Image: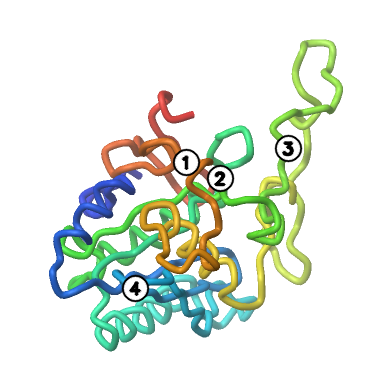
Amino acid sequence: MSPTRLGKCIVPPLRLVSILEWRRTGSIIIGLDINEERVGIALAKHPNSTNKVHALEPIPYLSQDRNVSRCERKEEVALKLEALVREHKVNAFVVGWPLQADGRCSAPCGKVLHLLDYFADRQKPFINAGRPLTLWDERIIPQGKTTQRLMLSSKDETPADKWGRSSTFCLQPEQVPGSRIFRSTEKFYHKTTNDSTTAATILKHFMDTHWEPKDESEVEHYLDMYHGDSHGIGGSDIDDYDEVGAYIQPRLL
């Protein structure tokens, strides 16, 4: 499934910063952390002297209740986010992009795009070209800031088989306890939290990277780790995706 309307909504981080800078009346930004269990939400206003971010109550996402369909759950999340957008007059979104440590996309990225695509494809989408989003690479956030969510090491130390393949090539999918759902091995999934702490961290990191707080005590010193626009992607960079993976242009890997 190729991205359609969603591709027009995704912009590179610096493009989003430029859009927000041109707004004379200020902007409200929402940070999202999308995982299997819930959608973490954080809110911030730009400009503000400290880049202060507020973590909000997360929205439950995929349920183990077999009486609740996936489409129903996605619509519940969409309706709650839509209400927040109207209430706070949101102008943009910063969404956590859970790449593996070596830069590859796997199931978590596919799940992020799948839900975002649902938001963008609704009859009256709250994510659109006038209210864009950017995908923020979680790998550049200092370890400990996201409770070590990225579990996969950039070096695969497992021995190769006689054909030179990694032994992980033959790993069998694991069954989710209490359900008929099978998924890839756990190491390809980032850890989740019970609240919106990770969403707040993602949004705070994005803001501190582009707008240095006037209060020195609030500076997280992220700027030395950031170079240009290399830690986010735009809609034109996405080639294809589904719920179990995402495929982007090779130059970004």
Disc 2 marks which amino acid?
Ile
Disc 4 marks which amino acid?
Asn
Disc 1 marks which amino acid?
Tyr
Q: Give the SS element for disc 3.
A: loop
Which of pointers 1 and 4 lies earlier in the amino acid sequence?
4
In this figure, which residue is indicated by the disc labeled 3? 153
Taking the image as shown, residue 63 lies to the left or right of residue 124, namely right
* Measured Cα–Cα span from mark 3 to mark 2: 14 Å
* Measured Cα–Cα span from mark 4 to mark 3: 36 Å
* Measured Cα–Cα span from mark 2 to mark 4: 23 Å
Using a 10 Å C-alpha cutoff, classify the residue at mark 2 as few (fewer than 14 neighbours), some (14 to 19) or many (20 or more).
Answer: few
* Measured Cα–Cα span from mark 1 to mark 4: 21 Å
Tag nearer the camera, 2 or 4: 4
Residue 96 position within the rendered picture, expressed as x and y whole percent measured from the top left = 48, 57
Q: Give the SS element for disc 1.
A: loop
In this figure, which residue is indicated by the disc labeled 2? 140
| Label at residue 226 | 1
| Label at residue 48 | 4
Q: Give the SS element for disc 4.
A: loop
Tag nearer the camera, 1 or 3: 1
